[in-house]
Image (cartoon, helix red, strand yellow):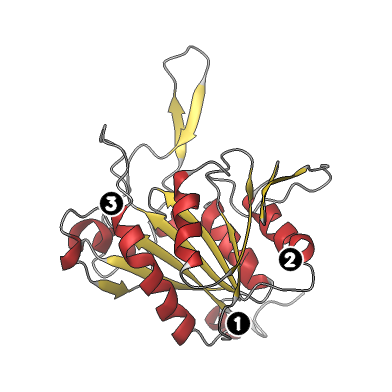
Amino acid sequence: MKDDPYILISNDDGIDAPGLKYLIEIAKKISNNIFVVAPKENQSGAGHRFSLGKELDLERIENNIFAINGTPADCVVVGCTKIMGDKKPDIVLAGINHGQNLGDIINCSGTLAAAREGALHGALGIGLSQAYDYDSDKEIDWSCSIKYAEKIIRGLIREHSSNNTYYNINFPIKEHAEEIDVQIIPHQRFSTSPFCYYESMNEGKFFVTIPKTPLPLDKGHDFHELHHAHSIIITPLLLQQTDEIMLRKLQGKIKL
Protein backbone atom coordinates (compact mmCIF):
# COMPACT_ATOMS: atom_id res chain seq x y z
CA MET A 1 0.00 0.00 0.00
CA LYS A 2 1.20 3.51 -0.81
CA ASP A 3 2.62 5.87 1.80
CA ASP A 4 0.12 8.35 3.27
CA PRO A 5 -2.95 6.28 2.25
CA TYR A 6 -6.43 7.74 1.95
CA ILE A 7 -8.38 6.74 5.06
CA LEU A 8 -12.14 6.95 5.52
CA ILE A 9 -13.45 6.66 9.09
CA SER A 10 -16.99 5.87 10.24
CA ASN A 11 -18.72 4.22 13.20
CA ASP A 12 -22.14 3.21 14.52
CA ASP A 13 -22.06 5.06 17.85
CA GLY A 14 -22.51 8.44 16.18
CA ILE A 15 -20.52 11.53 15.28
CA ASP A 16 -20.12 12.63 18.93
CA ALA A 17 -18.89 9.26 20.23
CA PRO A 18 -15.55 9.37 22.07
CA GLY A 19 -14.34 6.23 20.29
CA LEU A 20 -14.61 8.03 16.95
CA LYS A 21 -12.48 10.90 18.22
CA TYR A 22 -9.82 8.48 19.46
CA LEU A 23 -9.80 6.66 16.12
CA ILE A 24 -9.33 9.92 14.22
CA GLU A 25 -6.24 10.70 16.32
CA ILE A 26 -4.88 7.19 15.78
CA ALA A 27 -5.45 7.45 12.01
CA LYS A 28 -3.60 10.79 11.90
CA LYS A 29 -0.46 8.93 13.02
CA ILE A 30 -0.74 6.74 9.91
CA SER A 31 -1.77 9.27 7.25
CA ASN A 32 -2.45 12.94 6.55
CA ASN A 33 -5.36 12.04 4.26
CA ILE A 34 -8.22 11.50 6.70
CA PHE A 35 -11.94 11.76 5.90
CA VAL A 36 -14.76 11.11 8.38
CA VAL A 37 -18.42 10.36 7.63
CA ALA A 38 -20.43 9.16 10.64
CA PRO A 39 -24.10 8.89 11.64
CA LYS A 40 -25.64 11.90 13.39
CA GLU A 41 -27.13 9.58 16.02
CA ASN A 42 -26.35 6.20 17.54
CA GLN A 43 -26.89 3.38 15.04
CA SER A 44 -25.72 0.42 17.15
CA GLY A 45 -27.18 -2.85 15.89
CA ALA A 46 -28.10 -1.35 12.51
CA GLY A 47 -26.13 -4.05 10.71
CA HIS A 48 -25.69 -3.49 6.98
CA ARG A 49 -28.99 -1.66 6.53
CA PHE A 50 -29.22 1.12 3.96
CA SER A 51 -31.69 4.01 4.12
CA LEU A 52 -33.14 3.12 0.74
CA GLY A 53 -35.89 5.44 -0.50
CA LYS A 54 -35.22 7.98 2.27
CA GLU A 55 -33.75 11.40 1.56
CA LEU A 56 -30.71 12.04 3.75
CA ASP A 57 -28.99 15.19 4.97
CA LEU A 58 -25.24 15.75 4.81
CA GLU A 59 -23.77 18.12 7.39
CA ARG A 60 -20.18 19.37 7.38
CA ILE A 61 -18.94 19.42 10.98
CA GLU A 62 -15.49 20.72 10.12
CA ASN A 63 -12.91 20.22 7.38
CA ASN A 64 -13.22 16.65 6.03
CA ILE A 65 -15.57 15.61 8.86
CA PHE A 66 -19.24 15.02 7.99
CA ALA A 67 -22.39 13.61 9.60
CA ILE A 68 -25.48 12.17 7.94
CA ASN A 69 -28.85 11.07 9.30
CA GLY A 70 -28.28 7.52 8.10
CA THR A 71 -26.67 4.21 8.91
CA PRO A 72 -22.99 3.24 9.02
CA ALA A 73 -23.32 1.59 5.60
CA ASP A 74 -24.89 4.80 4.24
CA CYS A 75 -21.95 6.75 5.66
CA VAL A 76 -19.33 4.62 3.95
CA VAL A 77 -21.14 4.79 0.61
CA VAL A 78 -21.35 8.59 0.86
CA GLY A 79 -17.71 8.79 1.86
CA CYS A 80 -16.53 6.53 -0.97
CA THR A 81 -18.70 7.91 -3.77
CA LYS A 82 -19.24 11.58 -2.86
CA ILE A 83 -17.06 13.09 -0.13
CA MET A 84 -13.74 11.70 -1.36
CA GLY A 85 -14.57 12.25 -5.02
CA ASP A 86 -12.10 10.40 -7.24
CA LYS A 87 -9.80 9.77 -4.26
CA LYS A 88 -11.06 6.31 -3.36
CA PRO A 89 -10.15 5.20 0.18
CA ASP A 90 -7.29 2.77 0.60
CA ILE A 91 -8.48 2.00 4.14
CA VAL A 92 -11.88 2.20 5.84
CA LEU A 93 -11.70 2.20 9.65
CA ALA A 94 -14.87 1.71 11.70
CA GLY A 95 -15.10 2.46 15.42
CA ILE A 96 -13.74 2.53 17.94
CA ASN A 97 -16.94 0.86 19.11
CA HIS A 98 -18.17 1.28 22.68
CA GLY A 99 -18.19 -2.41 23.62
CA GLN A 100 -17.08 -5.67 22.08
CA ASN A 101 -18.27 -7.11 18.76
CA LEU A 102 -17.89 -10.86 19.04
CA GLY A 103 -19.36 -14.16 17.90
CA ASP A 104 -22.55 -14.12 15.86
CA ILE A 105 -23.18 -10.55 17.04
CA ILE A 106 -20.92 -9.38 14.21
CA ASN A 107 -23.83 -10.09 11.85
CA CYS A 108 -25.85 -7.18 13.28
CA SER A 109 -22.94 -4.88 14.10
CA GLY A 110 -22.99 -1.49 12.43
CA THR A 111 -19.27 -1.24 13.09
CA LEU A 112 -18.54 -4.38 11.09
CA ALA A 113 -21.02 -3.32 8.40
CA ALA A 114 -19.03 -0.12 7.86
CA ALA A 115 -15.80 -2.11 7.54
CA ARG A 116 -17.50 -4.61 5.23
CA GLU A 117 -18.96 -1.90 3.01
CA GLY A 118 -15.51 -0.34 2.80
CA ALA A 119 -14.07 -3.66 1.67
CA LEU A 120 -16.84 -3.97 -0.93
CA HIS A 121 -15.61 -0.65 -2.34
CA GLY A 122 -12.09 -2.07 -2.64
CA ALA A 123 -10.58 -0.69 0.56
CA LEU A 124 -8.90 -2.46 3.44
CA GLY A 125 -11.85 -2.65 5.87
CA ILE A 126 -11.14 -2.80 9.60
CA GLY A 127 -13.63 -2.70 12.46
CA LEU A 128 -12.30 -1.84 15.93
CA SER A 129 -14.07 -2.33 19.28
CA GLN A 130 -13.09 -1.70 22.88
CA ALA A 131 -14.46 -4.33 25.26
CA TYR A 132 -16.57 -3.20 28.20
CA ASP A 133 -18.17 -4.86 31.23
CA TYR A 134 -21.87 -4.10 30.74
CA ASP A 135 -22.58 -5.13 34.35
CA SER A 136 -20.17 -2.52 35.68
CA ASP A 137 -20.94 1.06 36.71
CA LYS A 138 -17.46 2.17 35.63
CA GLU A 139 -16.85 4.30 32.56
CA ILE A 140 -15.38 2.49 29.58
CA ASP A 141 -11.56 2.45 29.62
CA TRP A 142 -10.19 3.22 26.14
CA SER A 143 -6.53 2.92 27.14
CA CYS A 144 -5.91 -0.48 25.53
CA SER A 145 -7.25 0.46 22.11
CA ILE A 146 -5.55 3.87 22.26
CA LYS A 147 -2.20 2.24 23.06
CA TYR A 148 -2.26 -0.62 20.55
CA ALA A 149 -4.61 0.27 17.66
CA GLU A 150 -2.01 2.04 15.54
CA LYS A 151 0.40 -0.90 15.68
CA ILE A 152 -2.39 -3.39 14.87
CA ILE A 153 -3.64 -1.32 11.92
CA ARG A 154 -0.10 -0.96 10.55
CA GLY A 155 0.37 -4.71 10.85
CA LEU A 156 -2.80 -5.39 8.85
CA ILE A 157 -1.77 -2.84 6.22
CA ARG A 158 1.54 -4.69 5.86
CA GLU A 159 0.06 -8.20 5.70
CA HIS A 160 -3.27 -7.65 3.90
CA SER A 161 -3.29 -9.28 0.46
CA SER A 162 -6.88 -10.27 -0.39
CA ASN A 163 -9.70 -8.07 -1.69
CA ASN A 164 -12.10 -10.69 -0.31
CA THR A 165 -11.14 -10.09 3.34
CA TYR A 166 -11.98 -7.54 6.03
CA TYR A 167 -11.08 -7.58 9.71
CA ASN A 168 -12.67 -7.49 13.16
CA ILE A 169 -10.46 -6.28 16.03
CA ASN A 170 -11.47 -6.39 19.70
CA PHE A 171 -9.39 -4.84 22.48
CA PRO A 172 -9.75 -6.43 25.93
CA ILE A 173 -10.48 -4.96 29.33
CA LYS A 174 -7.06 -5.10 30.94
CA GLU A 175 -5.36 -3.15 33.72
CA HIS A 176 -1.82 -4.31 32.94
CA ALA A 177 -1.61 -3.41 29.27
CA GLU A 178 2.05 -4.41 28.94
CA GLU A 179 1.07 -8.09 29.31
CA ILE A 180 -1.40 -8.14 26.40
CA ASP A 181 -0.81 -10.42 23.42
CA VAL A 182 -2.52 -10.79 20.02
CA GLN A 183 -4.50 -13.81 18.83
CA ILE A 184 -5.67 -14.37 15.25
CA ILE A 185 -8.70 -16.63 15.75
CA PRO A 186 -12.23 -17.36 14.47
CA HIS A 187 -15.42 -15.86 15.81
CA GLN A 188 -17.72 -17.91 18.05
CA ARG A 189 -20.65 -19.65 16.43
CA PHE A 190 -23.44 -19.99 18.97
CA SER A 191 -25.80 -22.97 19.00
CA THR A 192 -28.68 -20.50 18.76
CA SER A 193 -29.14 -16.76 18.31
CA PRO A 194 -28.36 -14.77 21.48
CA PHE A 195 -31.20 -12.31 20.73
CA CYS A 196 -34.63 -12.79 22.28
CA TYR A 197 -37.81 -11.12 23.48
CA TYR A 198 -37.30 -9.50 26.90
CA GLU A 199 -40.14 -7.98 28.90
CA SER A 200 -39.90 -4.39 30.06
CA MET A 201 -40.91 -3.14 33.50
CA ASN A 202 -43.38 -0.91 31.64
CA GLU A 203 -46.64 -2.74 31.02
CA GLY A 204 -47.18 -3.78 27.42
CA LYS A 205 -43.60 -2.94 26.41
CA PHE A 206 -40.64 -5.19 25.63
CA PHE A 207 -37.13 -5.25 24.27
CA VAL A 208 -35.32 -7.33 21.68
CA THR A 209 -31.95 -7.79 23.35
CA ILE A 210 -29.23 -10.16 24.54
CA PRO A 211 -29.99 -10.95 28.19
CA LYS A 212 -27.02 -13.31 28.53
CA THR A 213 -24.27 -14.86 26.47
CA PRO A 214 -25.10 -18.34 25.15
CA LEU A 215 -22.88 -21.09 26.53
CA PRO A 216 -20.62 -22.96 26.12
CA LEU A 217 -17.90 -20.69 24.73
CA ASP A 218 -15.27 -22.45 22.66
CA LYS A 219 -11.61 -22.06 23.56
CA GLY A 220 -9.62 -20.64 20.71
CA HIS A 221 -12.54 -18.44 19.59
CA ASP A 222 -13.07 -14.72 20.08
CA PHE A 223 -15.56 -14.64 22.98
CA HIS A 224 -13.59 -17.00 25.22
CA GLU A 225 -10.13 -15.62 24.50
CA LEU A 226 -11.06 -11.94 24.84
CA HIS A 227 -12.60 -12.46 28.27
CA HIS A 228 -10.37 -15.24 29.65
CA ALA A 229 -6.97 -14.72 28.03
CA HIS A 230 -7.43 -10.93 27.79
CA SER A 231 -5.87 -10.92 24.33
CA ILE A 232 -6.33 -8.50 21.48
CA ILE A 233 -8.45 -10.51 19.06
CA ILE A 234 -8.18 -10.21 15.28
CA THR A 235 -10.63 -12.18 13.13
CA PRO A 236 -10.30 -12.11 9.33
CA LEU A 237 -13.74 -12.25 7.68
CA LEU A 238 -14.79 -12.99 4.09
CA LEU A 239 -16.96 -11.03 1.69
CA GLN A 240 -17.62 -14.14 -0.42
CA GLN A 241 -20.08 -16.06 1.74
CA THR A 242 -20.77 -19.05 -0.49
CA ASP A 243 -20.52 -22.41 1.30
CA GLU A 244 -18.18 -24.09 -1.18
CA ILE A 245 -18.49 -27.53 0.43
CA MET A 246 -22.29 -27.52 0.28
CA LEU A 247 -22.18 -26.02 -3.21
CA ARG A 248 -20.22 -29.02 -4.47
CA LYS A 249 -22.34 -31.48 -2.46
CA LEU A 250 -25.61 -30.15 -3.88
CA GLN A 251 -24.52 -30.07 -7.50
CA GLY A 252 -26.63 -32.59 -9.40
CA LYS A 253 -28.62 -33.52 -6.29
CA ILE A 254 -31.52 -31.04 -6.48
CA LYS A 255 -33.69 -31.71 -9.54
CA LEU A 256 -37.17 -30.85 -10.80
Type of amino acid at the residue the image marks with label 3: Leu
Relative vertical location of residue 230 with respect to residue 239 in this rendering, above or below: above
Q: CA distance from mark 2 to mark 1?
A: 20 Å
**Disc 2: which residue:** 84
**Tag 3 near tag 2, CB within 8 Å:** no
Residue at image x 81%, y 42%?
A: 54
Q: Is residue 56 visible?
A: yes
Label 2 CA crowd tier, 10 Å (few <14, some 14–19, many 20+): some
Contact, CB < 8 Å: mark 2 with mark 1?
no
Secondary element at image label 3: loop
Q: Which mark is residue 215?
A: 3
Can see residue 171? no
The label nearer to you, 3 versus 2, is 2
- Tell me, for residue 209, which label it has, or none: none
Mark 1 residue crowding within 10 angstroms, few (<14) / some (14–19) / many (20+): some
Residue under the point 79% across and 43% down: 56
Residue at position x 44%, y 63% from top? Answer: 26
Image position of 247 with respect to 209: above or below = below
Q: Could you tell me which quadrant the N terminus lies in?
A: bottom right
Q: Which mark is residue 163?
A: 1
Observer-nearest residue: 226 or 1? 1
Whether residue 221 sits left or right of residue 67 in the image: it is left
